[in-house]
Image: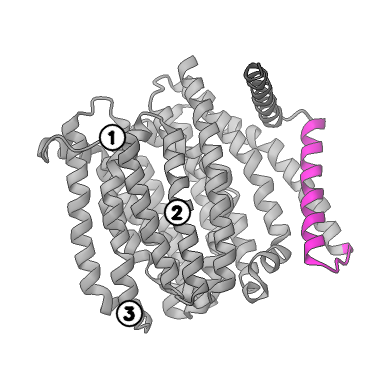
């Protein structure tokens, strides 16, 4: 188990470095682009998300998860997935190419025709790099995975900013996507030195598809229903309103990625190697509590400082996004926990259970969006929160049944983080309503500072396990750097 602990520690470290660096650059990029581009231009890209996402789901097909999960993978398996991905991407590019006029007519946006032609190129490029990426993930080489992604972001971001500044509009976003895909693919092949050494094999395809078929359906449902809101809002309202909603959602998701993806990206490949259910639950619960401890105060904190944050970062033209953002942050409290639960279920080879949860979740999400036809956007947002909570409870129950453990341990594990977060919320909320801040900068700085101080102080006073763990990790790292620095001094 010492090897698994080392892999977990290494995975967390490199996912932390990669995630913080990557999301930091993306965040800065989003600030520049939000000021240079109109909300409607972001809305145009969001209108295509459901069609691009559906094509990407078929290309992924769940075969990659089969490569990561199985321990008897051969070169025939890798080559089979490689050729399938390329073929599927070419087929779907042609479908989107000829469907572009129809898509534009759905939204009454003629400009979407050319945008579809160009944006669809990205998933053809991505299909070439999928197998090298699966190889790195399977071998738990998270350092390379994060370095590749970071380099790709660095290469594509300046191009988007320059094009937006020169007046390219929505095509600056298209160019960023394509350049990111090209750079990512090149680095994946460079770092893995992999190339297909066998032809397509039907036996390999069937073997991998048996495991991946449920995941394929899950991918399709996720892409359809995750982007169903963009289709509905773009169709029923306008590209501007869709742009406001997309800005709120992407800003919320940026925060979730920074807190949960650091851990969740490594859960499936590592948990797949643990055979004993008791040992799995012990490590699983540690991840679960750690994600809750980090994510709860961040989501609630962002909700409290939403208005000054949006004005400072994106300018006052994005103020309509603030209300959307606040409600979505409530749903964001449980989303990382859902991912932890589902990845644990998947690591036991029960992709069928994950599929069932996804079907329920997506059905609830569709009902939430459709309700907007009769009750408006506010009702949509509150129902999205409700669907996230229901999905969380169902996922927790299924994990309990699979690992044969008590829900009591989950509840007890969440109580400390929940109480600390509620205490922080009460104090910061009171200050924000009783003090009249004359500057958005001062308001943001003061509220964030008080929130961090309150949460950290309470964690220290009550000796919260997750706080002590994170503190010890920082201390160990600093001691290691100090020792290494001394060795370098002659």
**Badge nearest the viewer, 3 or 2:** 2
Q: Which mark is residue 104?
A: 3
Secondary structure at badge 2 equals helix
How far separated are the C-alphas under marks 2 and 1?
A: 21 Å
Main secondary structure along the magenta-highlighted residues: helix
Q: Which mark is residue 487?
A: none
The correct choice, above or below, for 435 with respect to 352 in the image is: below
How far separated are the C-alphas under marks 3 and 2?
A: 30 Å
Percent across and percent down for residue 367 are 45, 65
* Residue matched to label 2: 155
* Residue matched to label 1: 193
Determine the residue positioned at 79% across, 56% down. Answer: 445
> What is the image's colouring?
one colour
Secondary structure at badge 3 equals helix
Q: Earlier in the sequence, mark 2 or mark 1?
A: 2
Which residue occupies the foreground of this view, 127 or 184?
184
Q: Is residue 455 left or right of residue 164?
A: right
Residue 337 visible? The answer is: no
């Amino acid at each position: 188990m010492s090897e698994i602990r080392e892999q977990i520690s290494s995975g967390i470290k490199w996912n932390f470095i990669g995630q913080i660096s990557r999301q930091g650059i993306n965040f800065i990029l989003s600030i520049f682009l939000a000021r240079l581009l109109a909300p409607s231009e972001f809305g145009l890209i969001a209108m295509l998300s459901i069609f691009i996402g559906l094509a990407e789901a078929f290309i992924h097909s769940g075969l990659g998860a089969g490569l990561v999960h199985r321990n008897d993978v051969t070169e025939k398996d890798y080559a089979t997935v490689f050729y399938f991905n390329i073929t599927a991407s070419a087929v779907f590019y042609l479908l989107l190419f000829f469907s572009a006029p129809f898509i534009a007519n759905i939204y009454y946006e003629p400009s979407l025709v050319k945008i579809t032609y160009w944006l669809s190129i990205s998933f053809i490029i991505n299909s070439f790099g999928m197998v090298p990426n699966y190889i790195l993930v399977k071998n738990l080489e998270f350092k390379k995975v994060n370095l590749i992604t970071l380099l790709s972001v660095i290469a594509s971001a300046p191009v988007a900013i320059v094009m937006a500044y020169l007046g390219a509009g929505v095509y600056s976003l298209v160019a960023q996507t394509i350049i990111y895909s090209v750079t990512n693919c090149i680095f994946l092949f460079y770092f893995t030195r992999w190339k297909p050494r066998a032809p397509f094999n039907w036996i390999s395809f069937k073997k991998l598809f048996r495991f991946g078929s449920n995941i394929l359906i899950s991918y399709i449902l996720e892409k359809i229903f995750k982007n169903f809101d963009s289709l509905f809002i773009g169709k029923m309202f306008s590209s501007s309103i869709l742009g406001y909603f997309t800005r709120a959602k992407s800003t919320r998701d940026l925060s979730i990625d920074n807190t949960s993806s650091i851990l969740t990206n490594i859960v499936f490949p590592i948990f797949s190697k643990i055979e004993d259910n008791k040992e799995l639950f012990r490590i699983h619960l540690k991840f679960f509590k750690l994600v809750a401890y980090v994510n709860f105060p961040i989501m609630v904190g962002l909700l409290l400082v939403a208005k000054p944050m949006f004005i400072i970062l994106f300018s006052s033209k994005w103020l309509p996004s603030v209300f959307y953002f606040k409600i979505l942050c409530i749903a964001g409290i449980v989303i990382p926990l859902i991912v932890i639960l589902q990845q644990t279920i998947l690591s036991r080879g029960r992709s069928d259970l994950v599929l069932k949860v996804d079907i329920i979740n997506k059905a609830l999400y569709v009902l939430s969006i459709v309700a907007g036809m009769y009750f408006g956007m506010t009702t949509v947002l509150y129902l999205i929160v409700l669907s996230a909570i229901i999905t969380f409870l169902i996922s927790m129950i299924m994990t309990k049944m699979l690992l044969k453990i008590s829900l009591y341990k989950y509840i007890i594990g969440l109580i400390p983080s929940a109480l600390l977060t509620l205490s922080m919320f009460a104090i910061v909320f009171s200050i924000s309503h009783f003090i009249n801040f004359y500057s958005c900068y001062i308001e943001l700085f003061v509220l964030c500072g008080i929130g961090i101080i309150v949460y950290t102080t309470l964690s220290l006073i009550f000796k919260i396990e997750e706080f002590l763990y994170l503190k010890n990790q920082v201390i160990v790292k600093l001691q290691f750097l100090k020792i290494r620095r001394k060795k370098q001094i002659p």
